[in-house]
Amino acid sequence: MLNDPFQRLNLDREVLTVSQLNGRARLLLEDVFAQVWVEGEISNLARPASGHIYFTLKDKNAQVRCALFRQNAARVRQALRDGLAVKVRGKVSLFEGRGDYQLILDSLEPAGDGALRLAFEALKEKLAAEGLFDAASKRTLPAHPQRIGIVSSPTGAVIRDIISVFRRRAPHVALTLVPTAVQGREATPQIVRAIGLADRGGFDALILARGGGSLEDLWCFNEEAIARAVAACQTPIVSAVGHETDVSIADFVADVRAPTPSAAAELLAPSSTDVRQRLASLRQRLLLRMRERLHREGSRLDGLTRRLRHP
């Protein structure tokens, strides 16, 4: 075999054995791709008794076999499973016996949603152990609020949707926007400040709201600082972050979780039609009770009159 794997074959047709071909291909791959990072999704995960880990790393268009040998596998702390998005580091090689192209890994870590979901579960477990999710600590929402504070972005569909629901169902309720960023680096400290400001505003209840987005877009609502600000809030607070399928740490800590911002508004906006119907029902009950009382007292007066004697 040639010492230089890049040396071209002789112009006079050099014939290689299969072993020579695979050997040269392995040297080429390991020299060019001595250390690369690759991101993809785990599939076909296998853990034989040897302690090594084998799996296929894939994206929507391609896949590559990976091997994580026992010594490096022992350093992986997260639970691996099919479907987990990961970033792996290693060298590209070739298993000469079968001619299989593969990655020999020395490092593996969660990627994208995988890393965020692990952080989500870790914080959720920590705060649950501290009792921040306990039902006993939840405050009851007011039945007939007069002033509502909305902690959200001043732009976008969320604030318009909330206002629309209150105009339709309870136009008498006063709404106050406490503006804040809801995405990006500055969002977390801004939301914490906005919750504190709203809590001192004398509102009957608060709505913490944001529209839908990816896990990364909604991530600030999974930050510990915001969770503790929601827990410390003395005003009943409804968390309405993302779409119905989105769940945040703020949802677990808040007094009530609403699937959408519009649903949060409906929870706090008593329908004017329902209120009128209830008032009409109460009026009928009051009139009935008054008639019953008058009839009863009239009968009592008649009885007393009959017992009177002329002096």
Image (cartoon, helix red, strand yellow):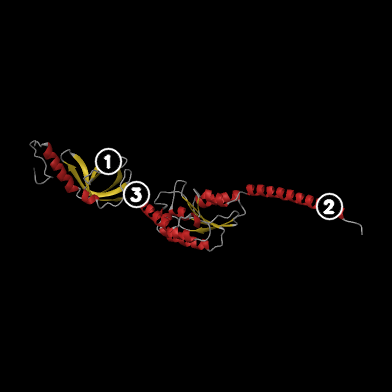
Q: Quadrant of the C terminus?
A: bottom right
Rendered location of residue 188, percent (x, y): 43, 59
Q: Give the crowd class for mark 3: few <14, some 14-19, many >=20 residues within 10 Å.
A: some
Left or right, 76 with reference to 187:
left
Rendered location of residue 219, percent (x, y): 41, 53
Residue plotted at (15% across, 42% down): 25
| Mark nearer the viewer, 1 or 3 | 3
Q: How many marks?
A: 3
| Mark nearer the viewer, 2 or 1 | 2
The reply to whether callout 2 and callout 1 are in contact (CB within 8 Å) is: no
Q: Give the crowd class for mark 2: few <14, some 14-19, many >=20 residues within 10 Å.
A: few
Q: Quadrant of the N terminus?
A: top left
Q: Is residue 159 visible?
A: yes
Q: Amino acid at mark 1?
A: Gln
Residue plotted at (24% across, 44% down): 66
| Mark nearer the viewer, 3 or 2 | 2
Examine the image and state in which quarter residue 81 appears: top left
The reply to whether callout 3 and callout 2 are in contact (CB within 8 Å) is: no
Q: Amino acid at mark 3?
A: Gly
Alpha-carbon distance for marks 3 and 2? 84 Å
Read off the residue under disc 3.
114
Left or right, 303 with reference to 121:
right
Q: Return the residue nearer the eye: 25 or 170.
A: 170
Q: Return the residue nearer the eye: 10 or 160.
A: 160
Read off the residue under disc 1.
63
